[in-house]
Image (cartoon, rainbow, N blue to C red):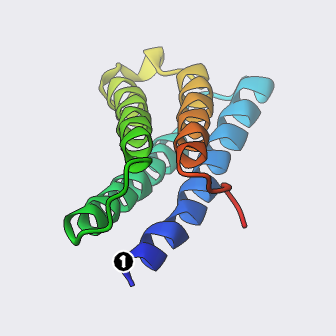
Amino acid sequence: MLLHAHSGFRYLVLLFGLAVIAYAAYGMATHRPYDARMRALSAMFVGTIDVTILIGFANVFTGMFYPQLGGHIVMMVLAAAVAHVVHGVMKRRPDDERTWAPHLVGALVTLGMIWAGLMAIGRPIVG
């Protein structure tokens, strides 16, 4: 059951990651001021990553470990770190210094690292 939950959460991570990318790109293209919706989307993205990692570690601690998981775990932890750093830095910046670009770049890098982590165990992002 935990493995299915862990695998299913990747769709939420992908959904929120794409939402962050789309909203940040829209904000940059329209020169809109940074808003609370961007911060909320970023928080949801980070939160779903955290839940997915928590379920993943529960899988490992129940004995579902094999050698290829080493690369998967390293990439996922690094992806979570990137997402957390971007969210944390933007949250702490003064309102007039918040911009869209860190969210766009951070989500792209995070999703790229997640893709690499999935390739380490031979799984597609969707499918």
Q: Residue at x 58, y 37 (%)?
A: 116
Q: Residue at x 34, y 53 (%)?
A: 50
- Disc 1 element: helix
Q: Residue at x 41, y 29 (%)?
A: 82
In the displayed structure, would residue 40 be above or below residue 3? Answer: above
Question: Which quadrant is home to the C terminus?
Answer: bottom right
In x, y percent, where is residue 73? 37, 44
Q: Is residue 26 left or right of residue 57?
A: right
In the displayed structure, would residue 5 be above or below residue 93? Answer: below
The amino acid at mark 1 is Leu
Residue assigned mark 1: 2
Q: Residue at x 39, y 34 (%)?
A: 87
Say which of 28 and 69 sits in front.
69
For label 1, count other residues whose C-alpha is less than 10 Å away and answer few (under 14), some (14-19) or many (20+): few
Question: Which quadrant is home to the N terminus?
Answer: bottom left
Most extreme residue toward the front is 67
Most extreme residue toward the left is 61
Say which of 36 and 113 sits in front.
113
Q: Is residue 95 left or right of residue 37?
A: left
In x, y percent, where is residue 10? 54, 61
Q: Is residue 47 left or right of residue 27?
A: left
Q: Is residue 84 left or right of residue 75?
A: left
Say which of 55 and 122 sits in front.
122
Most extreme residue toward the right is 29
Most extreme residue toward the bottom is 1
In x, y percent, where is residue 2? 36, 77
In the displayed structure, would residue 99 be above or below residue 44? Answer: above
In x, y percent, where is residue 125? 66, 55
